Amino acid sequence: MLSAVKKFGNSAGIIIPKPLLSEIGARAGDHVDLRVEGDRIVIERVVNLPRRGWAEDAARLAAEGDDEPAWPEFANDDDAKLAW
């Protein structure tokens, strides 16, 4: 599909037809990753995976001995009187 680079203020852009966006699972407003490979610009949809890398970070913190709670546990004076 042939397209043209158009001026947008001090930048330039390309209008990506909806069928092409659909092929990569993206929609208008989604985040994409842009990179250059050789003489090509590659556009990839960014898949936002919550907690990505948390397990590795937790293991690293434990290995460094830096996995203690940020707020030490503390009790209130009347906690022993509470009935659950």
Image: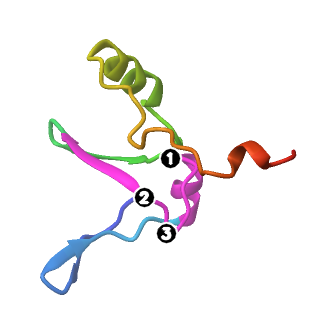
Q: Position of residue 37 (x, y in %)?
A: 20, 36
| Residue at 49%, 69% in the rendered image | 29
The disc labelled 2 sits on which kind of residue?
His
From the viewer's perspective, is residue 9 above or below residue 40? below
Q: Residues within 10 Å of mark 1 (few under 14, many from 20)?
A: few
From the viewer's perspective, is residue 51 above or below residue 41? above
Q: Nearer the viewer, residue 59 or 50?
A: 59
Image quadrant holding the C terminus, namely: top right
Q: Position of residue 69 (x, y in %)?
A: 42, 34
Q: Which mark is residue 31?
A: 2
- In space, the residues marked 1 and 2 are separated at their CA atoms by 9 Å
The disc labelled 3 sits on which kind of residue?
Gly
The disc labelled 1 sits on which kind of residue?
Asn
Image quadrant holding the N terminus, namely: bottom left
Q: Which region is colored magenta? A: 18-36
| Residue at 31%, 12% in the rendered image | 63
Q: Which mark is residue 29?
A: 3
The first of marks 1 and 2 along the sequence is 2
